[in-house]
C-alpha cells in the first residue's frame, strides 16, 4: 500500500529551486521510491487508499546527508576537550585505536546511529579510524549496525601505515573486509579511506590511488584540517596536501575531503577543477579550535559542499540539526555579516549539497519523483513550530531533534513518533556502557574520563 506523507510545508530541496516549498503538500511513497510530490488535496483524491501520515501543520524535508563522521568514536564521547586537534589525536584517538574490537565497532555505530536518526540523518558518510583488527576485521561491525538501524551508509576505513606496526597489507585487508561486508548490505556503499596524507607512506599512498581508481570507487580523506598538517606535508613533500593528492592522481577517483579549513586559493581551484566534494564540520572545528572553512569561497567556485557532524569524540553530539544551525552561525561570526549564510543555504548543504558532494544527487538529497524515499517529518504541533512563518528558517534556526517526528529511509519508517523503530534503544545503551568502560580502561584514559 502506498503512503501519503503530508505537511503544511513540503521543502523539496529540488536541484536549482531551493527553497521550493509546497504549501499543504504531500509526498507519495511507493516501495522505496518517491512516486509523486505535490498538492495534498489532489494527491489524496487521486490515491484514496493510501495510508496518510502527517498533518496540516507539519514540515517535510528531504533526509539529511551527513558527509563526515567516525563511528569508531561512538564509545568515547565527552573527553579531552582541552586539546586542539594535533594534541587531541595523541592524547585520545591514537590511544584508543589499538583497543577497538568488532563488538565495540558495532555497538558504537548503533549509539551514534540512533542519535543520527533522531536528528533526521538518512545517509551518513563514515570513516572508521582505528588499527586494523588483529583477531578479526572491525569494520563489518559498522555494516551490521547500519543494516539493523536502516541507515544508508557510505563507508570507509581510515587507513594509514605511518607509525603502525601492522604494515600495508593489514590495512588493505581491512579495506577488503569492509568492501565485502558492504556488498552484502542493505543500503551501504564502499569508499577507500585515506586517514590523511601524512598518515600514509609514499608506497601506501600510491597503492591507495591505484586501489580506488582500479575499483572505480570513491575516496574519503581528511584534508588540511589544521595548519600543522599543511606545514608537515610541505616539509616532507614540498607541496600542500591538496596539491600532493592532485599530483599523485588521487582526485581521479570521486573524492570527498573533510574539513578543508587551511586551504589557499590554489587548493580551492584544484577542488573545483577535480570536482572534489567538501565535508564542512562546523561544530568539531569549533570544539577543536581548528578554524572556519572557507565555505563561501568554495561555493563561489562551484565546489560541492555538505555538512558533517564528525565523530562522537570531536563533536561530541551526533545531532545534525545542531550542525546545520552551527554552519550558518559560524559563517556569520567568521565574516561578521548576517548574510554570510542564510537558512536556505544551510539547509541546501544538509540535503542536496551533501548528496552532490558524495556524487549521489541522482538518487538522494531532495524530494523529487524517482528518488529514494528518504524523508523527515517535523512535528508542527510542537510549541517550537506552532507559529511557523518561514518553514526553512523554522527547520534551521528553531527546530531541535525533539521536533523530528518521523524518518523514512528508502520508504522504511525507521523513526516513528520520535522513537527509533528498528532497534531496542534501551538494549543498545545497556550494551554500550560496559564496553565504553572497558575501552577507557584498556586505553588507560581514566585521567580524561573523570570530572575535575
Image: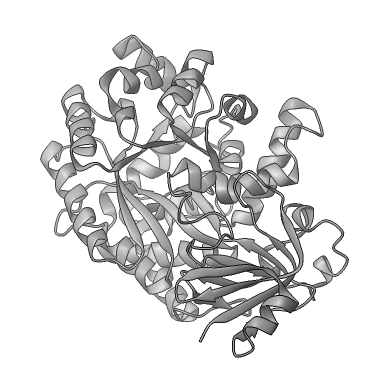
Residue depicted at x 24% and y 57%: 138
On the image, the x and y values in percent for residue 332 come to 75, 33
Residue depicted at x 60% and y 30%: 299
Residue depicted at x 22% and y 28%: 205
On the image, the x and y values in percent for residue 111 come to 46, 66
Q: Nearer the viewer, residue 47 or 133?
A: 47
Q: Nearer the viewer, residue 138 or 342?
A: 342
On the question of residue 314 being in view, the answer is: no
Residue farthest to the left, as pictured: 169
346 relative position to 146: left or right: right
Marker count (numbered) = 0
Q: Nearer the viewer, residue 195 or 95?
A: 195
On the image, the x and y values in percent for residue 68 come to 46, 46
On the question of residue 1 being in view, the answer is: yes
Q: Quadrant of residue 177?
A: bottom left
Q: Quadrant of residue 60?
A: bottom right
Determine whether 363 is above or below 375 in the image.
above
Q: Nearer the viewer, residue 399 or 63?
A: 63
Determine whether 146 is above or below 197 in the image.
below
Residue depicted at x 53% and y 66%: 117
On the image, the x and y values in percent for residue 118 come to 58, 67
- How is the rendered protein coloured? one colour
346 relative position to 387: left or right: left
322 relative position to 259: left or right: right
Amino acid at each position: 500500500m502506498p503512503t501519503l506523507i503530508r505537511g503544511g510545508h513540503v521543502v523539496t530541496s529540488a536541484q536549482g529551486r531551493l527553497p521550493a516549498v509546497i504549501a499543504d503538500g504531500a509526498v507519495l511513497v511507493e516501495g522505496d521510491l518517491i512516486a509523486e510530490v505535490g498538492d495534498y488535496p489532489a494527491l489524496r483524491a487521486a490515491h484514496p487508499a493510501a495510508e496518510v501520515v502527517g498533518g496540516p501543520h507539519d514540515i517535510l524535508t528531504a533526509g539529511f546527508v551527513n558527509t563526515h563522521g567516525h563511528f569508531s568514536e561512538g564509545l568515547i564521547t565527552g573527553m579531552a576537550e582541552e586539546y586542539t586537534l594535533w594534541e587531541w589525536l595523541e592524547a585520545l584517538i591514537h590511544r584508543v585505536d589499538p583497543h577497538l574490537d568488532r563488538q565495540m565497532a558495532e555497538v558504537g555505530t548503533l549509539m551514534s546511529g540512533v542519535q543520527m536518526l533522531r536528528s533526521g540523518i538518512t545517509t551518513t558518510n563514515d570513516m572508521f579510524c582505528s588499527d586494523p583488527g588483529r583477531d578479526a576485521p572491525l569494520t563489518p561491525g559498522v555494516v551490521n549496525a547500519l543494516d539493523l538501524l536502516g541507515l544508508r551508509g557510505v563507508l570507509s576505513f581510515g587507513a594509514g601505515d605511518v607509525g603502525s606496526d601492522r604494515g600495508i597489507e593489514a590495512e588493505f585487508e581491512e579495506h577488503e573486509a569492509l568492501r565485502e561486508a558492504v556488498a552484502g548490505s542493505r543500503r551501504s556503499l564502499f569508499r577507500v579511506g585515506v586517514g590523511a596524507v601524512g598518515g600514509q607512506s609514499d608506497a601506501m599512498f600510491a597503492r591507495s590511488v591505484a586501489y580506488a581508481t582500479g575499483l572505480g570507487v570513491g575516496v574519503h580523506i581528511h584534508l588540511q584540517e589544521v595548519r600543522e598538517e599543511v606545514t608537515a606535508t610541505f616539509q616532507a613533500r614540498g607541496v600542500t596536501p591538496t596539491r600532493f593528492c592532485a599530483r599523485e592522481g588521487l582526485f581521479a577517483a570521486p573524492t570527498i575531503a573533510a574539513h578543508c579549513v587551511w586551504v589557499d586559493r590554489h587548493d580551492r581551484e584544484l577542488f573545483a577543477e577535480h570536482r572534489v566534494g567538501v565535508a564542512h564540520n562546523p561544530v568539531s572545528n569549533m570544539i577543536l579550535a581548528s578554524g572556519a572553512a572557507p565555505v563561501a569561497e568554495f561555493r563561489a567556485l562551484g565546489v560541492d559542499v555538505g555538512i558533517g557532524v564528525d565523530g562522537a569524540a570531536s563533536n561530541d553530539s551526533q545531532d545534525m540539526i545542531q550542525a546545520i544551525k552551527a554552519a550558518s552561525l559560524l559563517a556569520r561570526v567568521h565574516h561578521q555579516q548576517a548574510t554570510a549564510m542564510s537558512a536556505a543555504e544551510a539547509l541546501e548543504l544538509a540535503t542536496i549539497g551533501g548528496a552532490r558532494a558524495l556524487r549521489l544527487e541522482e538518487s538522494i538529497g531532495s524530494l523529487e519523483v524517482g528518488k529514494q524515499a528518504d524523508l523527515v517529518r517535523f512535528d508542527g504541533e510542537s510549541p517550537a513550530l506552532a507559529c511557523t512563518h518561514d518553514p526553512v528558517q523554522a527547520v534551521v534556526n528553531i527546530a531541535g531533534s525533539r521536533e523530528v517526528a518521523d524518518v523514512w529511509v528508502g520508504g522504511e519508517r525507521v523513526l516513528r513518533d520520535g522513537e527509533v523503530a528498528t532497534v531496542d534503544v534501551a538494549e543498545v545503551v545497556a550494551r554500550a556502557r560496559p564496553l565504553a568502560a572497558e575501552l577507557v580502561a584498556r586505553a588507560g584514559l581514566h585521567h580524561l574520563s573523570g570530572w575535575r
